[in-house]
Image (cartoon, grey):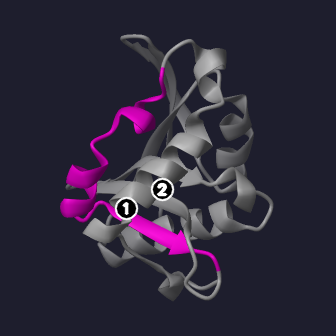
Amino acid sequence: MTHEEIRPAGAADVAAVKTVTDDAYRHYIERIGVVPMPMRADHAANVAAGRVFVTEEPGGGRVIGLVVVEAHADHLHLDSIAVHPDAHGRGVGRRLLEFVEAHARALALPEIRLCTNALMWENQRIYPKFGYEAVERRVDGPYDRVHYRKRLS
Protein backbone atom coordinates (compact mmCIF):
# COMPACT_ATOMS: atom_id res chain seq x y z
CA MET A 1 0.00 0.00 0.00
CA THR A 2 1.36 3.43 -0.91
CA HIS A 3 0.36 6.92 0.12
CA GLU A 4 -1.48 7.20 -3.19
CA GLU A 5 -3.84 4.50 -1.94
CA ILE A 6 -4.88 6.72 0.95
CA ARG A 7 -7.45 9.06 -0.49
CA PRO A 8 -9.83 11.78 0.63
CA ALA A 9 -13.13 10.32 1.79
CA GLY A 10 -16.22 11.17 -0.21
CA ALA A 11 -19.90 11.28 0.68
CA ALA A 12 -20.25 7.62 -0.35
CA ASP A 13 -17.69 6.71 2.35
CA VAL A 14 -19.55 8.19 5.34
CA ALA A 15 -21.19 4.91 6.38
CA ALA A 16 -17.87 3.06 6.10
CA VAL A 17 -16.12 5.78 8.12
CA LYS A 18 -18.69 5.34 10.89
CA THR A 19 -18.41 1.54 10.77
CA VAL A 20 -14.61 1.46 10.91
CA THR A 21 -14.52 4.09 13.66
CA ASP A 22 -17.15 2.32 15.76
CA ASP A 23 -15.53 -1.08 15.29
CA ALA A 24 -12.07 0.29 16.12
CA TYR A 25 -13.13 2.14 19.29
CA ARG A 26 -16.08 0.12 20.64
CA HIS A 27 -13.92 -2.10 22.87
CA TYR A 28 -12.73 0.98 24.78
CA ILE A 29 -16.20 1.93 26.08
CA GLU A 30 -16.09 -0.46 29.02
CA ARG A 31 -12.47 0.36 29.84
CA ILE A 32 -12.79 4.16 29.87
CA GLY A 33 -16.42 4.29 31.04
CA VAL A 34 -17.63 6.62 28.28
CA VAL A 35 -18.08 6.52 24.52
CA PRO A 36 -14.78 7.57 22.91
CA MET A 37 -14.94 10.94 21.17
CA PRO A 38 -14.26 9.54 17.67
CA MET A 39 -17.46 7.49 17.92
CA ARG A 40 -19.41 10.67 18.68
CA ALA A 41 -18.00 12.64 15.75
CA ASP A 42 -20.14 14.04 12.95
CA HIS A 43 -18.62 11.85 10.25
CA ALA A 44 -20.63 13.41 7.42
CA ALA A 45 -19.49 16.92 8.41
CA ASN A 46 -15.86 15.79 8.72
CA VAL A 47 -15.97 14.14 5.29
CA ALA A 48 -17.65 17.20 3.75
CA ALA A 49 -14.95 19.42 5.27
CA GLY A 50 -12.20 17.33 3.65
CA ARG A 51 -10.81 16.20 7.01
CA VAL A 52 -11.11 12.43 6.46
CA PHE A 53 -8.74 10.22 4.48
CA VAL A 54 -9.41 6.53 3.99
CA THR A 55 -7.62 3.42 2.83
CA GLU A 56 -9.26 0.33 1.41
CA GLU A 57 -8.41 -3.33 1.17
CA PRO A 58 -6.10 -4.04 -1.75
CA GLY A 59 -7.96 -3.98 -5.02
CA GLY A 60 -10.39 -1.27 -3.93
CA GLY A 61 -12.39 -3.30 -1.45
CA ARG A 62 -13.99 -2.03 1.73
CA VAL A 63 -12.55 0.79 3.81
CA ILE A 64 -10.26 -0.68 6.48
CA GLY A 65 -8.62 2.41 7.93
CA LEU A 66 -8.90 6.16 8.18
CA VAL A 67 -7.54 9.32 9.69
CA VAL A 68 -9.34 12.53 10.59
CA VAL A 69 -7.07 15.58 10.52
CA GLU A 70 -7.45 19.32 10.84
CA ALA A 71 -4.88 21.87 9.70
CA HIS A 72 -4.15 24.82 11.98
CA ALA A 73 -1.75 27.70 11.42
CA ASP A 74 1.08 26.04 13.35
CA HIS A 75 0.29 22.32 13.33
CA LEU A 76 -1.75 19.46 11.92
CA HIS A 77 -4.11 17.98 14.48
CA LEU A 78 -4.62 14.23 14.17
CA ASP A 79 -8.13 14.02 15.56
CA SER A 80 -8.63 10.30 15.02
CA ILE A 81 -7.00 7.25 13.53
CA ALA A 82 -8.99 4.05 13.15
CA VAL A 83 -8.12 0.65 11.74
CA HIS A 84 -10.80 -2.01 11.43
CA PRO A 85 -9.99 -4.89 13.82
CA ASP A 86 -9.96 -7.32 10.88
CA ALA A 87 -7.02 -5.38 9.41
CA HIS A 88 -4.83 -5.27 12.53
CA GLY A 89 -1.28 -6.50 12.06
CA ARG A 90 -1.10 -5.54 8.38
CA GLY A 91 0.73 -2.21 8.78
CA VAL A 92 -2.37 -0.13 8.05
CA GLY A 93 -1.92 2.07 11.12
CA ARG A 94 1.75 2.64 10.32
CA ARG A 95 0.93 3.66 6.76
CA LEU A 96 -1.79 6.01 8.00
CA LEU A 97 0.64 7.66 10.43
CA GLU A 98 3.19 8.00 7.62
CA PHE A 99 0.48 9.59 5.48
CA VAL A 100 -0.36 12.09 8.24
CA GLU A 101 3.30 13.11 8.44
CA ALA A 102 3.55 13.47 4.66
CA HIS A 103 0.32 15.50 4.64
CA ALA A 104 1.63 17.85 7.35
CA ARG A 105 4.87 18.32 5.41
CA ALA A 106 2.92 19.02 2.18
CA LEU A 107 1.03 21.73 4.07
CA ALA A 108 4.37 23.10 5.40
CA LEU A 109 3.24 22.59 8.99
CA PRO A 110 6.04 22.15 11.54
CA GLU A 111 4.35 19.66 13.85
CA ILE A 112 1.58 17.14 14.37
CA ARG A 113 -0.46 17.09 17.56
CA LEU A 114 -2.84 14.46 18.90
CA CYS A 115 -4.27 13.18 22.12
CA THR A 116 -5.37 9.79 23.37
CA ASN A 117 -7.26 8.66 26.40
CA ALA A 118 -4.97 7.83 29.31
CA LEU A 119 -6.62 4.41 29.59
CA MET A 120 -5.86 3.56 25.95
CA TRP A 121 -2.42 2.35 27.00
CA GLU A 122 -1.81 0.59 23.68
CA ASN A 123 -1.63 3.99 21.98
CA GLN A 124 0.83 5.26 24.57
CA ARG A 125 3.21 2.49 23.48
CA ILE A 126 2.67 3.11 19.77
CA TYR A 127 3.00 6.89 19.37
CA PRO A 128 6.51 7.22 20.86
CA LYS A 129 7.72 4.58 18.39
CA PHE A 130 6.73 7.00 15.62
CA GLY A 131 8.52 9.99 17.15
CA TYR A 132 5.68 11.49 19.18
CA GLU A 133 6.46 12.89 22.61
CA ALA A 134 3.98 13.21 25.44
CA VAL A 135 3.68 16.87 26.40
CA GLU A 136 0.72 17.06 28.75
CA ARG A 137 -1.94 15.07 30.54
CA ARG A 138 -5.22 16.89 31.01
CA VAL A 139 -8.77 16.02 32.01
CA ASP A 140 -11.38 17.40 29.60
CA GLY A 141 -14.83 16.63 31.02
CA PRO A 142 -15.09 12.84 31.31
CA TYR A 143 -11.93 12.31 29.22
CA ASP A 144 -8.48 11.91 30.81
CA ARG A 145 -6.16 12.62 27.88
CA VAL A 146 -2.48 12.41 27.15
CA HIS A 147 -1.44 14.99 24.55
CA TYR A 148 1.39 14.28 22.11
CA ARG A 149 3.31 16.17 19.48
CA LYS A 150 5.76 15.32 16.76
CA ARG A 151 8.01 18.08 15.51
CA LEU A 152 8.87 17.82 11.85
CA SER A 153 12.25 18.98 10.63
> Where residue 43 sits: x, y (%)?
31, 49
Please state the extent of the stretch shown in magenta in the rendering.
35-57
Asked if residue 126 lies left or right of residue 36, the reply is right
Is 145 placed above or below 23 here?
Answer: above
Exactly how many numbered labels are in the figure? Answer: 2
In the rendered structure, are the residues bearing label 2 and label 1 in contact, judged by CB atoms less than 8 Å apart?
A: yes
> Where residue 19 sits: x, y (%)?
49, 50
Asked if residue 146 lies left or right of residue 109, the reply is right
> Measuring 59% from the left and 85% from the top, which residue is drawn there?
2
Name the N-terminal-most of marks 2 and 1. Answer: 1
Is 3 placed above or below 99 here?
Answer: below
Q: Which mark is residue 151?
A: 2
Q: CA distance from mark 2 to mark 1?
A: 6 Å
Name of the residue lying farthest toward the right: 89
Foreground: 142 or 26? 26
Question: What residue is pinned by disc 1?
Answer: 110
The answer to which quarter of the image holds residue 74 is: bottom left
Foreground: 121 or 14? 14
> Measuring 71% from the left and 29% from the top, which residue is drawn there?
121
Q: Amino acid at mark 2?
A: Arg
> Measuring 52% from the left and 41% from the top, which residue is drawn there?
22
